[in-house]
Image (cartoon, rainbow, N blue to C red):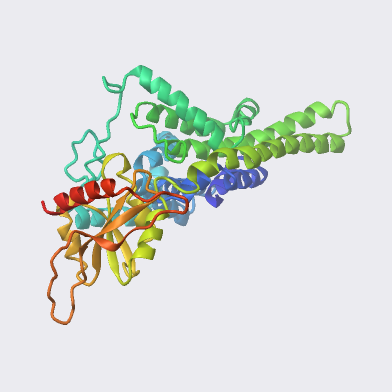
Amino acid sequence: MLAIALLAARLFGYEVGALCAVLSAFSLLLILLGASFMSHTTAIMFAAAAAAIHVHPKAQRLRWAQLAVGFFASLALITRPQDAFIILGPAALTAVFRGILKVTRNALSVAWIAAGAAGPLLFLLLWNLTLYGRVFASGYNLGASSPDSLNPIIADTFGLSNSFPLRTAVRQFIWTFARFNRVLFGWPCSLFFIPFAVAIRPRRPVLGLLVIFLATLTLYFFFPYYGFEYEARYYAPAALAAVILSAAGIHAGIGLITTFYSRRLPPEAARASAHALTAGILVAFFLYSLTYYWPAYLAPRYRNDYESVSRRPHEICSASISGEALVLLPAVGDDHFRYGSGLVYTDPFLRSRIIYARDLLPDEQCVLDEFPRRAIYRFVPTHSWDSGYLVKLRDRIDPADGSRQNRTDEPSESRSLEPHGKEEISRKERKVREAQTSEVGGR
């Protein structure tokens, strides 16, 4: 929020920056993304910070500013490369064109920016070396061609094809854009004020922000997966531009209304009337968000199952397991992301009483060997993940003699814990699931 507001203040003045701070604080898309483990808002923060420092009037003469630009830009790049290119691309192109006219001075600036970027980029190379075994590697599995991807389930593609024709792309774009227009602020039309900025403030910053906005829409028009999580998460770079343009549009609209009223009213009365009218529109929009969009749409959708993360598996495991344990959560079928329901409760230092891991099915032994002093369970959920039962795979290994007990693959004594008002899992269904679990465990 502060990085976006600072960028807006640098581009349009501190009044627009203050408006931008308020709008970004109430942006539902940024709130949804910011509370997640996704990288969108982190990349936006770094990119906005780099852009805000870059557009400072004295940035070209301050070495620390150029170092900071390189540092934050490279952090954005290693956090989410495609969004960093979209946000920082206009500034980079402008710098290139200016550099053609002033080669010597700009070459020195580029050198300082590169020096600032060296630290995060070196960290990325060391990360690649540790994770993939070589410094130049990428986990992006574009076209299922990356040998480095740790999640081969996701095979990204780009562009129109037989499986993603133009008709599907257009329908997906309309659907995603409509959701973005609602979730940006929760208003009936969240993009309402942007035309005022474009019409009244035809300045270079407006053009740059429009390029960011349109580049986001264009890039993801050709991406087959529409990113429905958090309503329209792929449009996060467009949200950065839209929030700033909305703040600039509100400020420009106040000036336009003031000019209109000044023909009939004294200047102070005209200004007060313009502010009152604009405030009334904003209050009406925010009331719509608070009284309808939040309670009728967002809360039911995300309250108990925020991006495939439910509280129920952890509640069941906490009530059913005594002592230290490792619980394997399934990651197959349409629910292959729901293992995050346990990861959000796992201590990052792996010291909590119950820790969770993705169930690797036949290859889970590598995980079991790392935690000899924990009992191992497999969580078998119902279809909706609002209940389930535990299958014990192994007791903890006694550290006194180091003996490893045999895997049991038997349901634990506390096999299921149903939520209030739900019927228990039928015996027939449970036997089928236990048979499937035992079959998988015995492979």
Viewer-proximal residue among 23 and 272:
23
Q: Is residue 229 left or right of residue 11?
A: left
Q: Is residue 135 visible?
A: no
Residue 212, compared with residue 169, is above or below; it is below
Q: Is residue 294 left or right of residue 373?
A: right
Q: In this view, does 94 lie to the left or right of 403?
A: right
Residue 137, compared with residue 377, is above or below; it is above
Q: Where is residue 30 in the image (x, y as percent from the top left)?
A: 51, 44
Where residue 278 sits, quadrant-wise, is top right
Viewer-proximal residue among 59 and 200:
200
Residue 170, compared with residue 180, is above or below; it is above
Viewer-proximal residue among 368 and 58:
368
> Which residue is pictured at 22% across the width and 33% down the height?
143
Q: Where is residue 141 in the image (x, y as percent from the top left)?
A: 24, 39
Q: Is residue 292 left or right of residue 367?
A: right
Where residue 234 sits, quadrant-wise, is top left
Q: Where is residue 142 in the image (x, y as percent from the top left)?
A: 24, 36
Tally of numbered tags: 0
> Which residue is pictured at 47% across the width and 50% down the height?
421
> Which residue is pictured at 42% across the width and 39% down the height?
229
Name the outermost residue toward the top. 167
Viewer-proximal residue among 350 and 414:
414
Q: Is residue 41 visible?
A: yes
Q: Where is residue 257 in the image (x, y as percent from the top left)?
A: 76, 30
Name the outermost residue toward the front. 427
